[in-house]
Every structure is written in C-alpha cells, then in structure tokens.
Image (spheres, grey):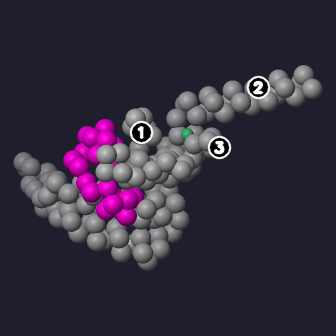
Amino acid sequence: MEYPILGTEPLPVEFANTLYGDFDCLGTPALAAGWFAEMGLGVADAGRARELRDAVRQALSHEADAGAVDVLNAFAAEAPSVLRLEGDRKARWVSTTDSVLGRIATCAIELLVDGVVPRRCGAPDCGLMFVAQHARRRFCHPTCSGRVRQARYYRRQLEEQA
Ligand SMILES: [Zn+2]
C-alpha cells in the first residue's frame, strides 16, 4: 500500500491528505494503522482519526466552522503539555501523554493561528494539500508538475497533427 505522504509537509497537512480523492487512508483500522506506522507515529483509533481528519481538513481549507473548532479543541485537550526548563533560560513544551491525535490537533491549531493556508495541488488527478514556501509553487511534488507538463506536451503534439 502506497500512502499519499509527501514527507515535506507539517503533520496536520499530511494528516489532512489521508483523504486522497475517493480513497480514505483511514478507511479501515488496518489502513489507518499502516498510515500511522509509515508516519512513525503511535496507533490511533481509525474512527476517531477520521473525525479529527475531517475537522482538520475543514479548518485548513476554509474558515473553521463551529463544528471543526469543537472537534479540534476536544482532541487538543487530550494532549496536555508542560513547559520544561532545559538548561539556562531555555525551555520547551513537552507532551505529558502519547496521544497522537491530541498532538495532531494541537499542531493544527498552531498552524491555524500562524495563518497557514495550504494550497491544493494543481494536477487534476491529485489535489493533495501542501504549504507553499514560495508564491509560485502550484504542485505538491515534482512528479505532479512533471505529469502535467507531459500531458500538456502530448496535447500540443496531437493538436499540431490534427
Ligand atoms: Zn500533486
């Protein structure tokens, strides 16, 4: 099973991409377990993961609606963290539980607060979300831009022959 994991995106964006076209990578417990393992994360319940994923997708692609806000807050509450002092005047927030979904919800809230608005890949058969580091980026991955460029090339060839 090859999951649509870009490996370049913030965790909540990769998580939102578990709905890939019609295919739901969290659709069954086995699929979900595979995705979490591939991401190097602990396991989570597939049904609850889908609930959080749908809220994350909603909040990242539109203005978060009241339902998504409630879901994100409820999941984030599962990831209590403490501020730990690490040496002289350095500190870091560390999670006190290993709730994967809580961590994802917390990361998603941070992305929203930072004003991050992911784009959709411009390849018609893709649509994965990604965070554009520069304004002109239109594709999630070079393979998508290559595919689109190739399709355009063949179309032009056909038009010239016609
Ligand atoms: Zn793409």
Write the residue at 42% across / 34% down. Answer: 2
Label whose residue precedes the other's in the sequence (1 or 2): 1
| Quarter in which the C terminus is drawn | top right
Which image quadrant is residue 108 in?
bottom left
| Quarter in which the N terminus is drawn | top left
In-front residue for pair 94/42: 42
User: In the drawing, what numbered circle is on residue 124?
Assistant: 3
In-front residue for pair 40/109: 40
Label 3 SS: loop
Left or right placement of residue 3 versus residue 100 in this view: right
Which image quadrant is residue 102 in?
bottom left
Q: Residue furthest left?
A: 87
Q: Residue furthest bottom?
A: 66
The three-letter code of the residue at mark 2 reads Tyr
The three-letter code of the residue at mark 3 reads Pro
Q: Is residue 40 above or below residue 76?
A: above
Decide if residue 31 is in sight here. yes
For disc 1, does the CB lie below 8 Å from ligand 1?
A: no
